[in-house]
Image (spheres, rainbow, N blue to C red):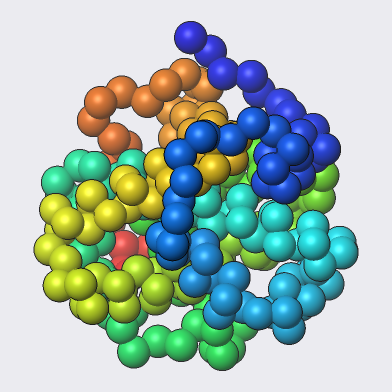
Amino acid sequence: MSFPKFRTFRTLLGVLLGNVSRDKCDRGTVVTLNDELLAGLGAPGLEQIAGMLGTDQLTARKVTEAVSGTIVGGLAYNAAHPDGADALRGALDDHMDADPFNGDVASLTRDGHSILGHIFGAQATERAAARLAQLAGVGSARIMKLMPLIAPMIMSLLANRAVERGMDSAALADDLDRERTSLSGGLGELIDELLGDVLDGSGMPRPPAPYPAYRTEREVTPGSTYNADW
């Protein structure tokens, strides 16, 4: 079964705004990482993102939601592999004291590129940005500026949650899988399609063993900008 390669921004907005059919199940009072992210950004943060993307604030919110869903989905797929879950759980301790919502943009960007390198690898990060740009109707260079800013925010929120709930690597993997499947039906399908395309490079469903995102320096593809340090 192959996935459709392209969708219009109108379709993306329809999914995110609820104009496309969603799962019938009610999320109730469950607070997701995306909910926490949007709360942390607030109106001023979304206004800055809108300026970065060259869009209005509502569109910026929807693009931010898609970017965050992609990052969370990538983490979930990789944490499904025990080695990936162990590496991620250990890395979260380094993000406990960070405050990415008030951090320096240059520092956030450096940290974000390292995180994205662990999730996707450098080349797949660029492919993810290109796919998101096609879906959102904004330049991929602008998406590439947004993704490394969002990644440290997601890591910080996830680190706080892991400590508050006393999560080990198995519990973390389960929590991320719930996050991935809690995405509203249309958006969840879009994210799964995008990740299937980006992580496999084929547009086909991913194999049972996820892409090993957490690699050593010796395993990095030559020419990659992958950073082995979280």
Left or right for 101, reference 81: right
* Residue 20 position in % (x across, y down): 70, 33
Say whether residue 97 is visible: yes
Residue 6: quadrant of the picture: top right
Residue 191 visible to the viewer: no
Task: Give the residue displayed 30% in from the left and 72% down from the top.
Answer: 161
Of 221 and 112, which appears nearest the observer? Answer: 112
Residue beneath the point at 64% across and 19% down: 4
Q: In this view, which residue lies farthest toward the top?
A: 1
Residue at left offset 31%, top offset 78%? 160
x and y percentages locating residue 158 in the rendered image: 35, 69
187 vs 69: above or below: above
Vertical order, 9 against 158 (above or below): above
Q: Is residue 223 left or right of residue 85?
A: right
Quarter of image, res 30: bottom left
Q: How many numbered callouts?
A: 0
Look at the image and tell me in which quarter the C terminus lies: bottom left
Residue depicted at x 15% and y 72%: 166
Residue 117 lies in quadrant: bottom left
Q: Residue 70's x, y, as percent?
A: 52, 48
